[in-house]
Image: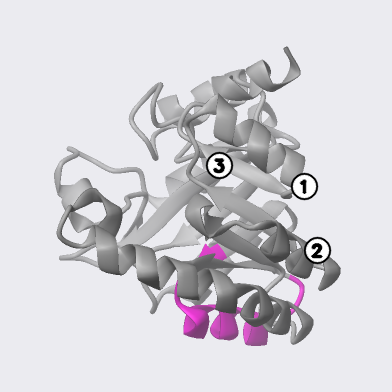
Amino acid sequence: MRRVGHKGAALIAPGNTFASFDAAVAADVDMIEFDVLREEHGDRLILAHDWADAAGRESPHTLEEALAYFASDRFAGVELNVDLKLPGYELRVLDALRRDGLIERALISSQHEASLAVLRAEEPRVRLGWSVPKLRRDPFRSRATRPPAFIALQAFRLLLPARAARALRAGRCDALMAHWRLVTPRLVRRVLDAGGELYVWTVDEVGRLRELEALGVSGVMTNDPRLFAELVT
């Protein structure tokens, strides 16, 4: 199971920052996930989860700065999960990865299937991850939305394995990036049988990490990659 640092190591240092990436490497991750967003009032590509996140920081790193940082020897062998938060700048990200020689180490993910199609048409060899579900906020946090969200979750769990397998076999993606609530033994089997990988987000409890490892998922994202050390104790 690949150990993936979410936004680097967001529970150790602020996510999507060099300090967070350094903390993830210190915890011996296999992959670092980070977010790429176009500025709300500008054209630069920056590392931020959303525009509110970007506004709350004095100066978010640009994509160019981050890729130059990842190209150093310090991150040799560490894979990169580049998560595109919005459509419209897919090819700019692809070109930046090519310039820094990082395309072979990258897995580009998005909730937007149209973005994956743009990337696949331009660069067939790049690894792509389809991130599900497509939500702006967690409906389970609100007491009012929790009951309908639970019903929707059960339906999505039934439909997702077949949908994921079709997407993988058609070459539309190489991996499924699924929220932990969606993961079932059936989903794991269908994804792996279709030749794909299954990455799970975002897990910050050792017990759940153990459960997912036992299911045979390809990798798990956590905000605190120090937890992975507890899996071998």
Name the quadrant of the C terminus.
top right
Residue drawn 58% across the image and 50% down it: 200
Q: In the structure shown, which secondary structural element does the residue marked by tag 2 occupy? A: helix
Mark 3 or 1 closer to N-term? 1
User: What range of the chain is rendered magenta?
Assistant: 109-125
Residue 157 in the figure: left or right of residue 228: left
Residue position marked by numbered label 3 in the rendering: 221
Nearer to me, 36 or 109: 109
In space, the residues marked 1 and 2 are separated at their CA atoms by 9 Å
Residue position marked by numbered label 1 in the rendering: 216
Residue 186 in the figure: left or right of residue 47: right
- Residue type pointed to by label 1: Gly
Q: How many other residues sit within 10 Å of disc 3, few (<14), some (14-19) or many (≥20)?
A: many
- Residue type pointed to by label 3: Met
Depicted 55 relative to depicted 127: above or below: above
In space, the residues marked 3 and 1 are separated at their CA atoms by 14 Å
In space, the residues marked 2 and 3 are separated at their CA atoms by 18 Å
Residue 130 quadrant: bottom right
Residue 57 quadrant: top left
Residue 146 in the figure: left or right of residue 36: left
Residue drawn 51% across the image and 22% down it: 23
Residue drawn 52% across the image and 24% down it: 22
Spot occupied by residue 97 in the image (x, y as percentages of width and height)? 60, 59
The answer to whether residue 8 of the structure is visible from this angle is yes
Q: In the structure shown, which secondary structural element does the residue marked by tag 3 occupy? A: strand
Name the quadrant of the N terminus.
top right
